[in-house]
Image (spheres, helix red, strand yellow):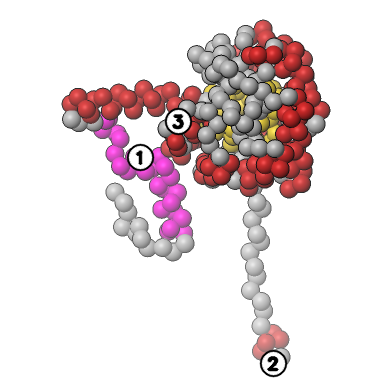
Amino acid sequence: MTANQKHTAKPLEAPLPTPPVSSATRLRQLLSSPSTFLLCPGIYDGFSARIALSVGFDALYMTGAGTSASLLGHADLGLLSLPQMSTHASNLASLSPTTPLIADADTGYGGPIMVSRTVTQYAAAGVAALHLEDQIQTKRCGHLLGKQLVDPPTFISRIRAAVQARHRIGSDIVIIARTDALQSLGYDESLARLRAARDVGADVALLEGIASKAQAAQLIKDLHPMPCLLNMVEHGATPTITAAEAKEIGFKIMIVPFAGLAPAYSAIKEGMERLKRDGVLGSGEEMTPGMLFRVCGLEESLKIDEEAGGGAFGGGVD
């Protein structure tokens, strides 16, 4: 080593930034607070997610029905596979990695091995929580009639596999146990299934198709202190319960799967009918290409390019 080499100072390295808390950890922290109540709009694609984020929601819900409708154009009848759902979840979660995304995981897409794989892939996708249900593999939307269920041991094996997978990979992803037993087997059997799921490590309970506000209040009482989630599908099996009412009853989370789908259907259909009738779309003057792309993160993308020294957008885009 030469003298110059001995006395040459090494450049100081900037300290690495502290990584942000994961959305799953953030969700667990929120659920541990007595005052937390999360209202989660149902999103079904990146555009609906961007709109929900711009409004300021603290958490989002990836609806399985909406995903089936938007990706496949089919009813929610269990047609989507794990790769399709986990890829879709990854795309949505990446839009705001610190905003908790709760995602439908159907039945876990198979036995315990597949459930474990589902949890692993959802966690890797950045999902903060997922719900697993007790329907058979050829499942259907929880607000349709004629649902068929697996027996309690099979359901509990799904939940146990999910909890074990979570611990195995060292993830804080929240496991939500959902039962669809209310419709055919009644409240007592539904409660027994949720209690059994709690006993093997489920973090949150979801009773699908709650029939009344009184039943909702009874559920909170019977499962206390386990956090409960309300699936609020308007005009479905559950009477309309507002967010304020859900919080007062004692729910910690309320998901609204049709929050994006219902207004989108009305607006898109109206626009299509106008286009067919008048030959012009007639959208509002504010709906320019620039406005659309700004909703979808245009400014953030331009900033990334500029900070990295890229010159592709130096002249602007307007």
Residue 67 is left or right of residue 212, and the answer is left
Asked if the stretch drawn in magenta spans residue 97, the answer is: no
- Amino acid at circle 2: Thr
- The spot of residue 290 in percent (x, y) is 32, 43
Q: CA distance from mark 1 to mark 2?
A: 61 Å
Residue topped by disc 1: 292
Q: Secondary structure at mark 3?
A: loop
In front: 75, or 197? 75
Q: Secondary structure at mark 2?
A: loop
Residue topped by disc 3: 74
Q: Characterize the magenta stretch by its predominant secondary structure.
A: helix
Q: Residue at x 49, y 34 (%)?
A: 67
In front: 289, or 35? 289
Q: Quadrant of the N terminus?
A: bottom right
- The spot of residue 71 in percent (x, y) is 45, 37
- Amino acid at circle 3: His
Residue 296 is left or right of residue 109, and the answer is left
Specify which label sits upstream in the sequence, 1 or 3. Answer: 3
- Amino acid at circle 1: Leu
Q: CA distance from mark 3 to mark 2?
A: 73 Å
Q: Residue at x 52, y 34 (%)?
A: 79
Give the foreground label among 1 and 2: 1
Q: Residue furthest left?
A: 278
**Mark linked to residue 2:** 2
In front: 181, or 246? 181
- Depicted 87 relative to depicted 236: above or below: below
Q: What residue span does the magenta drawing correspond to?
A: 283-307
**Residue count near mark 2 (Cα–Cα under 10 Å), binned few <14, some 14–19, many ≥20:** few
Q: CA distance from mark 1 to mark 3?
A: 27 Å
Give the quadrant of residue 305: bottom left
Give the foreground label among 3 and 2: 3
